[in-house]
Image: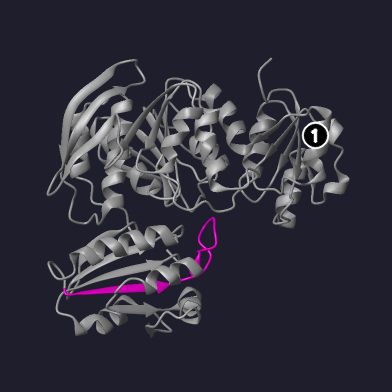
Amino acid sequence: MRPLKDCRALVVDMTHGGKVICEELLRRSCEVHAFDNHKTLKKEEVDSLTKKGIKVFSDEKGLKVEEYDVIIVQHADPRMNLFSSALELGIPIISHARAVGIILSEMKGSLKIVEITGTNGKTTTANMVSKILCDSNGTVLIHDSLSTRVLKDSKEFLLAEGLSITPANVLRAFRLSENYDLDYAVFEISLGGTGAGDVGAVTGIYENYRASFFRNAFNSKLQMAINMKNGILVLNGDNIARNFAHAFFGKSNTYGIERGKEVRVKRVGEKVEGIVEGLSTISGREINCPFAFKLHQNLFGRFQVLNALGALSIAASLDLEVDEACRSIEGFRGVKGRAMAEKAERGIFVDCSNRGVNATAMLSVIDEALLLRGSKVDGIVAVFSGSERATCEIIDTQRLSEELKKRKIDLIVLSGALGRRLAELGIRGEFVENLSKNEVEKLSARFNNPLILLFSNEA
């Protein structure tokens, strides 16, 4: 019997991709019911699902749990009666990610799949990997938090913009690319992995925010290790994510500046130099060789080095040549809003505008900037704007304010709800109602060569 085929399924959470899973299950001759527990479906969406034969519930009371063979859930309160009843009746409860993995594993054929999750660095790592694969003459589908597109012969073909990176949209991205003869697919995924990946990477867990049916980011990202059975797991050794290797069925490769294992750094200077030793590939090979690459000047900070190490580790795990991967990394110019530096009229402007920006990432960039004061720049300017809520979490403004007070930042500029909250918590700075790059540069004119850091989640 094939899983998720000819069965009665209840899909919970229509807000984070449930509709996509419902439609895929219909293709597999399933009887499908949908539970809109967040009550976000519009009437026309409910009507559309109903016309397709999907019964939609908005209240738990109308559900008859005993009617289902499987329950598929993403974001929902695990204390709901629905789930306790299912457990008593022996009805399996699986995540959206697991369901996607089951379906995609049957559809992928010879396609090599990379899945990338983590709280920081996903988008940049995914784009670096995609460039490496394209540079090696591969046709690559990339689905990230910016867009869904195909890379071929150094050209980009846009398929969609604005699709979220919830696990279900992996299927949507795959369907959008069906007219292309793909060699690789690179998926940035918000919560864990689907299990369909040949390589699954965890770039790190720096904020353990509340997330999904699995309660927090750590347990959600852990699904990358739990769901994948036959691939290679790539882990950031400088982060607690390295511990996922202990819960993984197969082989893993760990990279890092300080605690790398299979990909480890010997020196970070003008170039990043290190060694690959005992790295396992999907074909069963083992790679041992030195490596070196120089990051483009657009890429600012330690996190960018880790992103590059992650991309190198993924590429090597896919059996690509290490030297070729390093050459591709050197040609990578960065992703807008992901610690991307550019020369301003006066000084350097680092754009960290990212919908998922969190306190840990902000503080890490600030700390690296402070190390440059006096030698390369004469003033550090930190700009905080946007909302207190990032994509998957509430920014820990209490912690952020406490840590900012410990650091000697030359100028702080505040704007928006985030800026107001930091001001309420005692952060002293210039408040700007209508923030613009020009306004920030005017305020920074008191310095000859400032380093300006823009933190905003309104990207």
> Which quadrant, please, contains the C terminus?
bottom left
x, y percent for residue 61: 87, 48
Is there any visible trace of residue 196 in the rendered image? no
Relative depth, front residue between 204 and 193:
204
Is there any visible trace of residue 420 in the rendered image? yes
Measuring 34% from the left and 16% from the top, which residue is drawn there?
283
Above or below, 51 against 197 in this view is: below
Is 387 one of the magenta-colored residues? yes
Measuring 20% from the left and 71% from the top, which residue is drawn there?
344
Snapshot colouring: one colour
x, y percent for residue 95: 63, 37
Amino acid, disc 1: Ala
What residue does disc 1 label?
Answer: 86
x, y percent for residue 420: 49, 80
Q: Secondary structure at mark 1?
A: helix
x, y percent for residue 238: 35, 43
Residue count near mark 1 (Cα–Cα under 10 Å), binned few <14, some 14–19, many ≥20: some
Measuring 31% from the left and 75% from the top, which residue is drawn there?
437
> Which quadrant, please, contains the N terminus?
top right
For residue 358, side relative to residue 79 (left or right): left
For residue 134, side relative to residue 50 (left or right): left
Count of residue discs: 1
Q: Magenta residues?
A: 378-397
Above or below, 69 against 458 in this view is: above
Magenta stretch: dominant secondary structure? loop
Measuring 24% from the left and 30% from the top, which residue is drawn there?
136
Above or below, 222 against 439 in this view is: above
Is 394 one of the magenta-colored residues? yes
The part of the image, by quadrant, that contains residue 385 is bottom left
